[in-house]
Image (tube, helix red, strand yellow):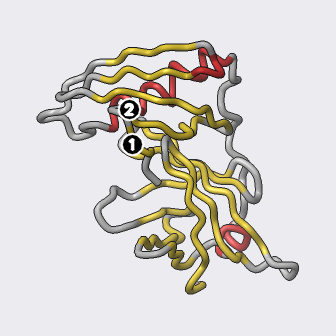
Amino acid sequence: GQPNYGYQWWCGDFHFGDRAAFTYFASGHGGQKIYVFPDLDLVVVLTHAVFDNPMGELHNSAILARYVLPAATGKAPQPDPVRLDSVALARYVGEYAASEQRFAIAYRDGGLIGTSEGSPPLVLAPVTPTRFRGTLLGLVDVTLDFEFAADGTVLGVRTRFMFNDRTYRRVRGR
C-alpha cells in the first residue's frame, strides 16, 4: 500500500477519484514534495508544514488527489450518492481483513461507518449499489468497491486512495 523507493525517488500509482496515474516523486523534510506524472505531462511542487498539523504528510497528497489531478485531467466532479435502504446497507456490515490489517463496517444512524484501529471513523456514502466513498479528515477521499458471490453475499472489498490499493476479504458478517 506504499510507494516503492529507489535512486532517491519514490514511485507508484497514485489513486484519485476513479483513476490512477503513475508518478515518481521526491519528498523533502517538513512536507516539501515534487511529483512528476509522465503520462499527464505534469510536474507538481507542493509545500506544507507537517509539524503540528493533524494531517501531517497526508495534506499534500490529499490536495493533489482532490484538487490538482482532477483539474489537470478534466475529471468531472464525483457523482451524488445514491440512496440505499437499511436492508441493502446491512449486507455490507461486518469485518474485513488483508494480511495484518483489519477494518469493520457498522450500520449507525441510517448509514454505514468504517472503522479501523488508529484511524478516524469513515462515513461511507453509496455512489452505486456496489461502490461507496468516504472522506478521512475532511480531505482524503477513499473509494470502496465491493465484490459479491452469485447469491449476493459480500465476499470482500477493494479500497483505493492515494498510493493505497488493497483488497480485503470478508472475515465475519453481521
Image location of residue 172, percent across then percent down: 56, 86
Query: Residue at 67% across / 36% down in the picture?
Result: 19
Identify residue for label 2: 9
Residue at the extreme left of the image, as rendered:
52
Query: Residue at 18% across / 29% down in the picture?
Result: 29
Residue type at mark 2?
Trp
Query: Residue at 52% across / 45% down in the picture?
Result: 161
Q: Label 2 vs label 1: CA separation?
A: 6 Å
Residue at the extreme right of the image, as rendered:
150
Image location of residue 84, percent across then percent down: 72, 59
Q: Is residue 21 left or right of residue 130?
A: left
Label 2 Cα neighbours within 10 Å, binned few <14 / some 14-19 / many ≥20 = some
Which of the 4 quarters of the picture holds residue 93?
bottom right
Look at the numbered disc 2 and give the secondary structure of its residue: strand
29 lies above or below 42: below
Q: Are marks 2 and 1 in contact (CB under 8 Å)?
A: yes
Where is the C terminus found, in terms of image quarters? bottom right
56 lies above or below 145: above
Identify residue for label 1: 5
Q: Is residue 91 left or right of residue 136?
A: right
| Residue 114 shows in the view | yes
21 or 64: nearer the eye?
21
Image location of residue 54, percent across then percent down: 21, 40
